[in-house]
Image (cartoon, grey):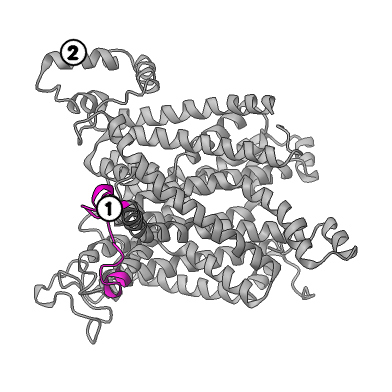
Amino acid sequence: MGRYLFKRLLNMIPLLILATLLSFALMQMAPGGPENILLSAEDARIDPSRAAVLRERWGLDDPIPVQYVRWLGNVIRGDFGNSYFYRRPVSEVIGAALPATIQLQAAAIILTYLIALPLGVLSAVRRRSRIDRAVTGLAFAAQAAPSFWVAILLIWGVARNADGLIPTHGIATPGVDLETCGLLAVLADRARHMLLPVTVLVFGNLTSLTRYMRSSMLEALREDYIRTARAKGLPEKVVVYRHALRNALLPVVALSGGVLASLVGGSVITETIFAWPGIGRVSHDAAVQRDYTVSMAILLISGVLTLIGFLLVDLAYVWVDPRIRYD
Amino acid sequence: MAAPESTSPLRQVARRFVRNPAAVAGLMVLLCLGLVALFAPQLAREPLDAIHVDQRLRPPGPGHPFGTDNLGRDVLSRLIWGARTSLSVGLVAMSVAVGIGTVVGAVAGFYAGTWVDLLFMRIAEAITIIPVYFLVVTVVAVVRPSLLNVMLVIGLTSWPGPAQIVRAQFLSLRQRAFAEASRAVGVGDARLIFRHILPNASGPIIVSATLGIGNAILVESSLSFLGLGAQYPQTSWGQMLSQGRQFLLQAPWVSLVPGLAIFLVVICFNCVGEGLREALDPKMDE
């Protein structure tokens, strides 16, 4: 395991370097270049002495490779510069938005798995039945439905029928806090606000996971050990849920990294529509406001977080399946 | 149940494809839509921006089968103009992605294990680790939002998928007897890759291209919805949907109809893609 971890971490280094290069290249491509971006974010255009300090900190007078190293050094220390739009350090802007996204994504991920895995198993076990057709059909439709359209449909339906019971934007009702309303009311309020965005995220990610689960389960059910288990007279339930399911779950675990990445990516649209104050919305606002330092930081951080997610998934995979060895 | 008179592989593929009703229906719808997009100037009842302030938010009815929007523009006409946007973005973005993906995947797969392969596949991975919407939203904003940029950005960020598919094909194809034989008679690497091996990998490439168009249309409409795609006076289904949002309760058709159009087109591309996949690889059960 230690050896595996070491090799796996080593493998991440080129990817990390490429991700930082991508982010750095973006700043070079932007109109006005890094000079314009970094200086205008801190009012240094007005105060020349401030400009000199910033030039020194970001090495703006150095050749580009040296600038990259300087920038990388700052980034590793958590210094992404200032946000042009928010007039605050980028790290603060992102730090403030991260909890909201984690709250939303955690709920969406758990629900996606809770719904997709049983659906996939059910549809594989009852292959070619009406249930199977319904599940595969739903998965097929969910894959093609644009998430913003699903969101708009939900908002439309809710606004017409639910009479304000289900909020269509924001993360909490202003005024509902722990002191005045108590824990229960706050939790209920939060849950109501999460209802629609979580539904959209889950719906959008149901397809791939359900499909993986179904085909993995079908494959497991064709294995020799399943025939053996049936031949020795084990009840069908034990055969399916003990013998097949355990083995079928392994490949699904391995693919979770991709599911995570697509869920997080989906937050850009979902958070923007439902005015959810998370990373996705900050990313959209930064793009629209040309707040490049924030955009670059989000690009880099989301890449690094996805990489860590992939790593954790791989480690979990090695842990549950001792047959897997690196290479 | 192979019919004796049709031995050509291409004909067999066509035969299997035709037996799949969903795929055939999808193809029919897409062909019709292609014609509609092509003849949009003749078919659309009104030009792209015929504003009629006196006909704002009319519900669907005679004259306006899908109603009008907040500026009194005929939703059906705009839908027809928008079909041009969706299809052209889908086709161009897919061509860029599959073009790059094929070359990169072919070279990486042919020289598997060498530094070229390592470099190409690391770059592909680096692109895939960044959640796709973060990437396209940011890059499109930096290079300025426009339909052309949207096409290019979608193409340039979605080639890793096709590249990995082509690479996997090459890994097994390059060891087959025909490739060994060509090499033995002295065929050069470039010719071997693109003339001998690549045609054998065309099946999976066609499938991923078909599915890629649907996906590119989804991404484009999302970007246009966020205001980062089609800019006035261009139109796009995603943009129409986002403009209708403010009038959702008074005039739901302005938002719901273009969304339905995106949904149906993407479903059609997926049906055709899946149909091709099954027709090209009959052994594959799932």
The foreground one among B49 and A280 is A280
Q: Quadrant of residue B261?
A: bottom left
A49 lies above or below A4: above
- Can you say which quadrant of the picture contains the C terminus of chain B? bottom right
Can residue B75 be spotted in the picture? yes
Residue B105, percent from left and from top: 59, 41
The numbered dot on residue A275 is 1
Residue A58, percent from left and from top: 29, 17
User: Residues in magenta?
Assistant: A156-182
A74 lies above or below B135: above
In which chain is the residue bearing label 1? A
Q: Is residue A170 magenta?
A: yes
Q: Regarding mark 1 in the picture, which secondary structure is present there? A: loop
Q: Quadrant of residue A82?
A: top left
For residue A310, side relative to residue B286 (left or right):
left
Can residue B77 be spotted in the picture? no
A24 lies above or below B260: above
Q: Which residue is mark 2?
A: A52
* Residue at the extreme right: A232
The foreground one among A48 and A165 is A165
The Cα–Cα distance between marks 1 and 2, rounded to whole angstroms, is 39 Å
Give the foreground label among 1 and 2: 1
Name the amino acid type tagged 2.
Answer: Ala
Name the amino acid type tagged 1.
Answer: Ala
